[in-house]
Amino acid sequence: MRLAILGTGYVGLVTGTCFSDFGNTVACIDKDAAKVEGLRQGRIPIYEPGLQELVERNTREGRLSFTTDLPAGIKGAEVVFICVGTPQAADGSADLSIVFDVVRSIRDHVDGPKIVVIKSTVPVGTNDKALEILKDARHPVRLASNPEFLKEGAAIDDCLRPDRVVVGVREAATGETLKALYAPFLRTEKPFLMMSPLSAEMTKYAANAMLATKISFINEMANLCERAGADINDVRRGMGHDSRIGFQFLFPGAGYGGSCFPKDIRAVVSMAGEFGAGSDLMRSVDLVNENQKKVLGAKVASHYPGGIAGKTFAIWGLSFKPRTDDIREAPSLVLIDSLLAAGARCQAHDPEGMPNVRKLLGDRITYAQSPLQALDGADALVVVTEWSEFRTPDFGVLAAKLRDKVIFDGRNLFDPAVVSRAGLTYHSIGRVTAKPPG
Ligand SMILES: NC(=O)c1ccc[n+]([C@@H]2O[C@H](COP(=O)([O-])OP(=O)(O)OC[C@H]3O[C@@H](n4cnc5c(N)ncnc54)[C@H](O)[C@@H]3O)[C@@H](O)[C@H]2O)c1
């Protein structure tokens, strides 16, 4: 099938590449000329494991191309996917201006009958509004909703082997075309779920709302454990083996970030207001998370009652989660702000996130080429993101390098007994602080 993808960010680039890998001819369209030029020369603008190789292969074999020219890009395409950003507006709602801009551009440039699919995360009812715009197109345009559930860091695998595909359609024929397009992705009997566009739009928000709720839930339990002297890790295991509960997304930490959960939860609150429905739970999930992002800073402040002016903190992890360079709403940024405001210095290492943080913070912090280099001259270590390479450090080396012999761990990567035996004080989340013996 001939396809066009509008918006070549995390979702659009991965989706377009995976469709081309299954033999479709895909034009990826983006308004960012530098990004398009880079992609044409084989430069991938984001870090996503496995993506580079797939883009190179499919470009070389002529199935994947990049352009800034929307009319040329959608020409001849049977299906056009909208994958542009839907950032948070000032009032917390989803800003749909880019989505409606591209819908109007499609209306003005359609060269024949098409299916337009909104893959961007959009509030319930957006598809209906877009249909109103497309009614004036010169050729028949059918509109569908197809929310995306991929996870950054595992996006290729999620895209090629989704748990399910959800589509919202008005006509069975549109559903059948999309089912044929997705058939190679669903070889392992995973379901293709057809519903109304309203339900498809809502499904995406409900799924993210559930996942964010689990995170805020376990973080609230962790904070209670810590004060009560219980260990969240034991509690988590005690709960998770209950088959009704399970373990997924029940890891306490420094709060969720990224380009989806924070804005999507606030968009649910905004939608609930619009439709006169309650949103007490979602407001709390957001509030718990905003407070959780401050927990590491608060632990540092209480460890140093005399203040931290002049202290140097090594920071392991900047991206909002491992295996991505995405730093949008990352807990690391909240921590760094609080450390800098209190007069401390920060030396950070992140395998992929440093260029993006440098664009944001410039020389306000220093950037280390390795986890060990970040420890040079540091007083304390703060672990913010659970990259695999941070999981098994030599604690003897850490104890020798860190002047104040203290670790603040926002992801519970280490065994408190092992860390404290090495002569380090170990603060983690939802567990009692471990101190060196004696
Ligand atoms: N990132 C994720 O993990 C993820 C997962 C599921 C769903 N989503 C949703 O998918 C959508 C896209 O997210 P993303 O993370 O890929 O965003 P992104 O910011 O990484 O990419 C958006 C792209 O759209 C381009 N763009 C902006 N205006 C344009 C225009 N007028 N014409 C063509 N291109 C234009 C931008 O230059 C950018 O490359 C959002 O609605 C998001 O909520 C994201």
Image: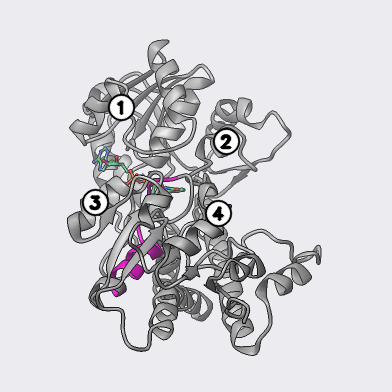
Q: What's the amino acid at mark 4? A: Asp
In this figure, which residue is indicated by the disc labeled 1?
A: 43
Type of amino acid under label 3: Arg
- Tell me the mark number nearer the camera, choosing from 4 and 3: 4
Residue at the disc numbered 3: 358
State the residue in front, 126 or 159.
159
For marks 3 and 1 on the same chain, the one whose residue lies earlier in the sequence: 1
Outermost residue, top side: 61
* Quadrant in which ligand 1 is drawn: top left
Quarter of the picture holding the C terminus: bottom right
Residue 195 shows in the view: yes
Asked whether residue 331 is drawn in magenta, I would say yes
Residue 78 visible, this angle: no
x then y, percent, for residue 318: 38, 56
Q: Quadrant of residue 65?
A: top left
Type of the residue with mark 1: Arg
Secondary structure of residue under mark 4: loop
Tell me which label, 2 or 3, sits earlier in the chain: 2
Residue annotated with mark 4? 394
Q: Residue at x 50, y 59 (%)?
A: 205
What segment is highlighted magenta in the picture? 324-338
- The residue nearer to you, when weighing 130 against 389, is 389
* Amino acid of disc 2: Asp
Q: Position of residue 6 (x, y in %)?
A: 33, 35
Q: How many numbered tags mark residues here? A: 4
Return the disc, 4 or 3, that comes first in the chain's sequence. Answer: 3
The quadrant holding residue 270 is bottom left
| Secondary structure found at label 1 | loop
Say which residue label 2 marks: 157
| Vertical relation: 181 (above or below) 361 | above
Q: Earlier in the sequence, mark 4 or mark 2?
A: 2
* Front one among 148 and 385: 385
